[in-house]
Image (spheres, rainbow, N blue to C red):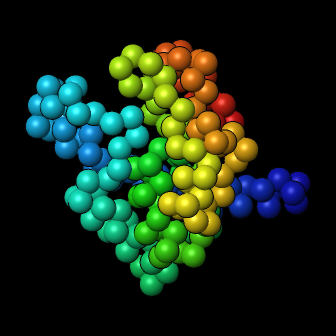
Amino acid sequence: RFIAALASMVLAVLRVIMVRHGESENNVLMAISQEAFANHRKVDPSLSPKGEHQAAAAGQYFLPSAGNAVDCIVTSPVRRALQTARPIAAATGCQPCVWTDIFEVGGMWMDDAAQPGIRRSDLEAEFPGYQAPPEVGEQGWYDVRQGIESEGMACARAQAVAQ
């Protein structure tokens, strides 16, 4: 009973805060037109200047003086999420952990073909201190053999992440 009571107290104070990445270059293209998006879309876009500002604001929100303590930062391996995590990491002193199972439906794709995503050496160079799992290799993190992720595959992945 004591352990169950202790577990319920720990669960009662667990707080998960999800932060969506800041505006990406692809978001800007989509706001211009479908044609601009189709012609200039990037597989793994960076944050736009507005997205960088949004990420900086998220970092301010998580400053210890703001009262929003953070013990762990988990981020998607997509560049815009990695960039969004950077100011939060700077504000909190936490090193982001990269999870390759959290990304938007569809995976990494361009011109109807799966793409591998950021390579380990690029991730380590651009985001020093981020903790990346072995799945992030020199060929990237997304398994191109599975193709463009279907909705069913995304649901299964989401269920696995939730567990």
Tell me: residue 125, above or below residue 42: below
Q: Position of residue 138 (x, y in %)?
A: 64, 42
User: In the rendered view, does 44 fall on the left or right side of 17?
Assistant: left
Q: As rendered, which of 60 and 98 lies closer to the eye?
A: 98
Please tell me whether residue 137 is drawn above or below residue 15 in the rendered image: above
| Quadrant placement of the C terminus | top right
Left or right: residue 73 versus residue 110 is right
Q: Position of residue 36 (x, y in %)?
A: 15, 31
Query: Please, is residue 107 above or below residue 94 in the view?
Result: above
Residue farthest along the left direction in this orientation = 32
Q: Camera-side residue: 54 or 138?
A: 138
| Up/down of 146 relative to 97, above or below | above
Residue 107 visible here: no
Q: How many marks?
A: 0
Residue at x 56%, y 53% (from the top left corner): 123
Quadrant in which residue 130 is drawn = bottom right
Q: Residue at x 54, y 32 (%)?
A: 116
Percent x, y of residue 109: 43, 26
Instruction: Tell me what residue is drawn at x 23 percent, y 59 percent.
Output: 49
Q: Residue at x 40, y 40 (%)?
A: 44
- Answer with the quarter of the image where residue 3 lies: bottom right
Spot occupied by residue 104 in the image (x, y as percentages of width and height): 45, 33
